[in-house]
Image (tube, rainbow, N blue to C red):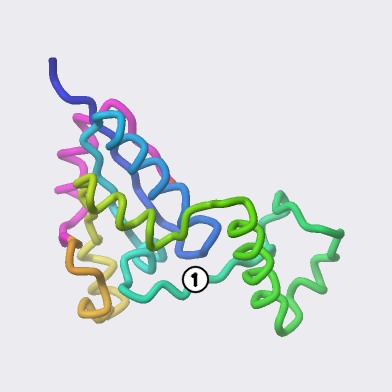
Amino acid sequence: MTEKKLAIIATKGTLDWAYPPFILASTAAALGYESEVFFTFYGLQLLKKKLDLKVSSLGNPGMPMPMPVPVFMQALPGMQAMMTSMMKKKMKSKGVADLEDLRDLCIEAEVKMIACQMTVDLFEMDTSEFISEVEYAGAAAFFEFAGESDICLYI
């Protein structure tokens, strides 16, 4: 029997969008899937050694909030910091794993993490800021794996 494969494309670099690729990849690895995540554009933020991710309700009308906040108020200075603080407190109170811990779990489970070389070059990113477990490749290399995967997700 061949091993099942999960391919994920991670494109977002905010706190709320950082969880899905790591939760799904670590869960799949625990279930015996060979898992690979291709980080591109803003998703590359998730590969930095120091994760300082923010969350914003702007452009995210589905975000549950303790009270309704009009869109124009969400753009005020300090709102992003407040939203990030609220999200972190909520996650901690509900026992949600820390993002670094989830990423470490993926590393331990041998989830392959690929940084899009084109995007790294485009944004002139300093690769010394990335965790050492990152591999660098282009989209074509990812397609080799994704083309054989049982599940392919775009996040």
**Element on which disc 1 rests:** loop
- Stretch of the chain drawn in magenta: 135-154
Residue at 16%, 60% in the rendered image: 135
Residue at 22%, 56% in the rendered image: 114
Q: Looking at the rendering, in which quadrant would you find the N terminus?
A: top left
The answer to whether residue 56 is magenta is: no
Q: Percent position (x, y) of residue 49?
A: 31, 73
Q: Quadrant of residue 13?
A: bottom left
9 is higher (above) or lower (below) than 77: above
Residue at 18%, 68% in the rendered image: 132
**What residue did someone put label 1 on?**
53
- Would you say 13 lies left or right of 119 here? right
The answer to whether residue 153 is magenta is: yes
Tally of numbered discs: 1
Q: Percent position (x, y) of residue 140?
A: 17, 48
- 7 and 83: which is toward the camera: 83
- Would you say 63 lies left or right of 91 here? right
Q: What type is the residue that disc 1 sits on? A: Leu
Name, please, the residue furthest toward the top. Answer: 1
- 62 and 116: which is toward the camera: 62
